[in-house]
Image: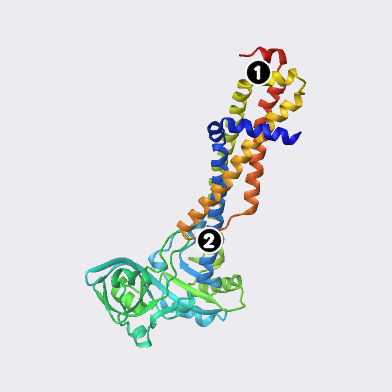
Amino acid sequence: MLLETVKLAIQAIFRNALRSFLTVLGIVIGVGAVIAMVTVGQGSTEQVTADVEKLGSNMLMIMPGQDAMEGGPAGTTDQMFTIRTNNLLEEQLSVINVSAPMSMARARAVFGNENRRTDVVGTDNRYFTAARWEIARGRIFDETEIKSGKPACVIGESVRKDLFGTSDPIGEVIRIKKLSCEIVGLLKSKGASTFGSDQDDFVIMPIRTFQRRISGNTDVSLLIAAVREGVATERAKEEIEAVLREIRRIGKGEDDDFTVMDMKQIATILSGITGVLTGLLSAVAAVSLLVGGIGIMNIMLVSVTERTREIGIRLAIGAQARQVLMQFLVEAIILSLFGGLIGIVTGLGLGWVGANMLSIPFRPDPNIILLAFAFSAAVGVIFGFFPARRAAQLNPIDALRHE
């Protein structure tokens, strides 16, 4: 009996194939959009975690000024660190494996007729260890270059491509502002981050060179500390905060004029942002399912009106009201399930395209796929019941009279 009902429903659907397709389009868009959004969102979250692990889950970033995310003011010039601040932290804290001072500015790097605007970073060799950078060609700075402030530099892959093409940059001289800087090393590429920023777009030089020739002051805007293996970053953070309060002579009860950020904390914040955005976009996409359900109800009401005479004949020759109800209800459910299946395929396809365009992992969630499919079936039941009930309640005599 049920098999016969399904056959009749499929015949009715394919009798008006174009209308049926347009009816389920809302379901297709809703299911597809939800699956695509969640897939891209989960891929983004995984990529954020991977990017943080590249930097090192045991890394702490120490910045002057209070945390702007907690409503504190940004760091000002008189709050900046110095190289001495960094060295004192490294000397006094056994929980730190290595700590590197950093200062940064935007400038144009020029070689021959080529140029590129890039980040110029002043630091020392401890930075390569703390941030887990590897040298692809050449070397890091020698002691003479670090102590004397000799204009040597290490460049990222993006800078190499723009300025040198396929040629070897080692030993060449580039100009940054009025400073001529010899390239001694090329870093291995890390590629784009989760949010599209280029991690290979910078030039590194000894911090004393940077301070004398680029910034014109002795400020250090950031310290990067790598915590020793086996030491919890929470413990290291507490000890760094205690020592920094002493170094900067912050009295009891006074607020810190610096911020210590754990990379795990940064990963949690970024993952939270991507999660919220994914949820919002998925909620908007889910509205299409509601629209699709209304479309199914509308077209089923039209179908009941068109087939009133057919319904009257079936009821007149002995069909029961529940059989008529089941016929139209099954038709609505099949329509929504077709839409759900097409939507799943569409959503996975869009998710794959999005993941490739954003260079993130393709991570479809089986639970979301099953939930979207079940929801599309529920839409068929809910929005198909009223038209089916209306068909079942038709008076056979009135139905036979219908033109």
Whether residue 318 is visible here, answered yes or no, is yes
Q: Residue 9: x and y, percent?
A: 66, 32
Mark 2 lies on a secondary structure that is loop
What residue do we see at 56% from left, 66% from top? Answer: 264
Q: Relative to the observer, which residue lies in front, 207 or 22?
A: 22
State which quadrant residue 123 falls in.
bottom left
Q: Relative to the observer, which residue lies in front, 277 or 233?
A: 277
Marked residue nearer the N-terminal end (1 or 2): 1
Q: Which residue is mark 2?
A: 361
Quadrant placement of the C terminus: top right
What residue do we see at 56% from left, 46% from top? Answer: 34
Is residue 18 shown above or below 55?
A: above
Quadrant placement of the N terminus: top right
What residue do we see at 59% from left, 33% from top? Answer: 14
Q: Which residue is mark 1?
A: 309
Q: Amino acid at mark 2?
A: Pro
Q: Residue 105: x and y, percent?
A: 34, 67
Is residue 363 shown above or below 213?
A: above
Q: Residues within 10 Å of mark 1 (few under 14, many from 20)?
A: some
Q: Residue 289: x and y, percent?
A: 58, 38
Q: Is residue 323 left or right of residue 365?
A: right
Q: Amino acid at mark 1?
A: Arg
State which quadrant residue 77 falls in.
bottom left
